[in-house]
């Protein structure tokens, strides 16, 4: 589950949200990564676009791939969300935005 910007949580609540997110990722995605054995799952807290940019910089990323939430409409009519938009505008490397992450 997500937390609205500006919401103040206790450290225990933050840790519970991170544990919940990790379980969701393991359940929904890790079982599909059968062809790869060199990957990491990282969950960060903070303002999403800032944390994505910091992670890319820290790992010397050469490409950022992001899924946007407009899966049910024509890709030509899709509007980028604010997180994708901020990453595209501020990233020091190319950014690919996909609208069908399950087909990537």
Image (spheres, rainbow, N blue to C red):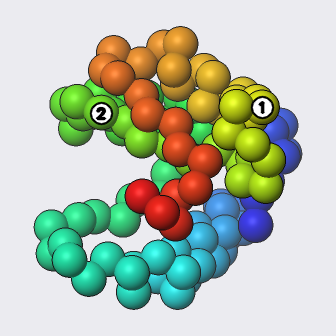
Cα separation between marks 1 and 2: 24 Å
Residue placed under numbered mark 1 in the picture: 77
15 is higher (above) or lower (below) than 3 = below
The location of residue 42, given as percent across then percent down, is: 39, 59
Q: Nearer the viewer, residue 54 or 87?
A: 87
The location of residue 16, given as percent across then percent down, is: 65, 74
Residue at 44%, 34% in the rendered image: 96
Residue at 60%, 31% in the rendered image: 84
Residue at 48%, 63% in the rendered image: 103
Look at discs 1 and 2 and give the one toward the viewer. Answer: 1
34 is higher (above) or lower (below) than 60 = below
Q: How many marks?
A: 2
30 is higher (above) or lower (below) than 53 = below
Would you say the residues marked 1 and 2 are in contact, meaning their CB atoms lie under 8 Å apart?
no
Q: Residues within 10 Å of mark 2 (few under 14, many from 20)?
A: few
Secondary element at image label 2 = loop
Upstream in sequence: badge 1 or badge 2:
2
Q: Residues within 10 Å of mark 1 (few under 14, many from 20)?
A: few
Say the numbered circle drawn on residue 44: none
Secondary element at image label 1 = helix
99 is higher (above) or lower (below) than 96 = below
Picture quarter with the C terminus: bottom left
Q: Residue furthest left?
A: 38
Residue at 42%, 41% in the rendered image: 65
Picture quarter with the N terminus: bottom right
Say the numbered circle drawn on residue 63: 2
Q: Is residue 11 visible?
A: yes
Q: Is residue 45 visible?
A: no
The location of residue 26, given as percent across then percent down, is: 46, 82
């Amino acid at each position: 589950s997500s937390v609205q910007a500006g919401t103040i949580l206790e450290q225990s609540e933050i840790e519970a949200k991170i544990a919940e997110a990790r379980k969701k990722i393991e359940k929904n995605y890790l079982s599909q990564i059968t062809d790869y054995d060199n990957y990491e799952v990282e969950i960060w807290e903070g303002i999403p676009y800032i944390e994505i940019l910091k992670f890319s910089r820290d790992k010397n990323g050469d490409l950022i791939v992001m899924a946007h939430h407009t899966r049910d409409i024509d890709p030509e009519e899709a509007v980028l969300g604010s997180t994708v938009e901020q990453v595209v505008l501020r990233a020091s490397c190319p950014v690919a935005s996909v609208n069908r992450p399950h087909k990537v």
